[in-house]
Amino acid sequence: MKLTYYGHSCFSVFAGGKHLLFDPFITPNELAKAIDINEIAADYIFVSHGHFDHVFDVVQIAKRTGAMVLGNWEIYDWFNKQGLTNTHPINPGGKFSFDFGTVKCVTAVHSSSMPDGSYGGVASGYVFKTPDGNFYYSGDTGLSLDMQLIAKWAKLDFAVLPIGDGLTMGVEDAIEAARYTGAKKVVGVHYDTFGFIKIDHDQAILDFANAGLSLYLPGIGNVIDL
């Protein structure tokens, strides 16, 4: 599978012949100023929760590409009110099959509200089974014993986990999350964008290596094979 990193917690995975885009927050991100959102391909857009740094560019990208936008019921309802018509609700515990494979929504331990202050429902993560492999995106979350259930549903090729600490897991807890889920390869997200979530890249990679795991920190705009 090919993963393209767009900064913060935004990335896309090409799997099952489709472009799966996650939590698009690019335009306001100074670190991602070289990214043109009008060139991003998307067939599906998955939203983990309602915070502005995960939804800012959803509407513009969805209207241009016609991508289906998925999120919990409150996020689904909110984007319908923003004029999107190709939307689909999915709540923790539920799963749906699409032309790329199957996605299961799981819990995340995090707060959630929409940019206008309205209720954003529960924060979520997503687990994917596709013909090309399986992966887990936790969304913004703290470490949870519920993550142990993911390995019972899918054998993961990789996981995408926040490592910036403060508002989400840091490196130490992300290592434990990888162990819970059975993922040997982890792509780190939700770091460096703001001053209070900056990390030491070399130390983070070393900490994962010492735990027998591989941490990937691709540059913004870079594509990696997983």
Image (spheres, helix red, strand yellow):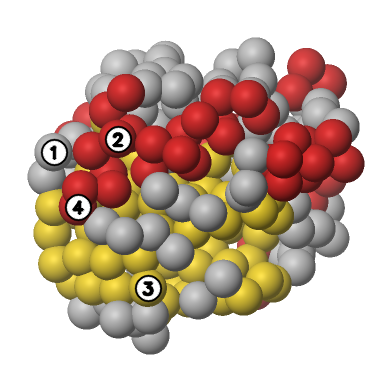
The answer to whether residue 162 is left or right of residue 71 is: right
Q: What mark, if any, has residue 133 been given in the picture? A: 3
**Disc 2 secondary structure class:** helix
Q: CA distance from mark 1 to mark 2?
A: 14 Å
Q: CA distance from mark 1 to mark 3?
A: 21 Å
Q: Nearer the viewer, residue 178 or 62?
A: 178
Residue sitting farthest toward the bottom = 17
Q: What mark, if any, has residue 148 been given in the picture? A: 2
Comes first in the chain, label 1 or label 2: 1
Q: What mark, if any, has residue 93 been given in the picture? A: 1
Residue at screen point 36% across, 22% down: 144
Query: Total number of numbered labels?
Result: 4
Looking at the rendered structure, the kind of residue marked 4 is Trp
Graded by Cα atoms within 10 Å as few (under 14), some (14 to 19) or many (20 or more), the crowding at tag 4 reads: few
Comes first in the chain, label 4 or label 3: 3
Q: Nearer the viewer, mark 3 or mark 2?
A: 2
Q: Nearer the viewer, residue 52 or 82?
A: 52
Residue 139 appears in the figure: no
Q: Position of residue 136 (x, y in %)?
A: 39, 51
Q: What mark, if any, has residue 153 been given in the picture? A: 4
**Disc 3 secondary structure class:** strand
Graded by Cα atoms within 10 Å as few (under 14), some (14 to 19) or many (20 or more), the crowding at tag 3 reads: some
Q: Nearer the viewer, residue 124 or 42?
A: 124
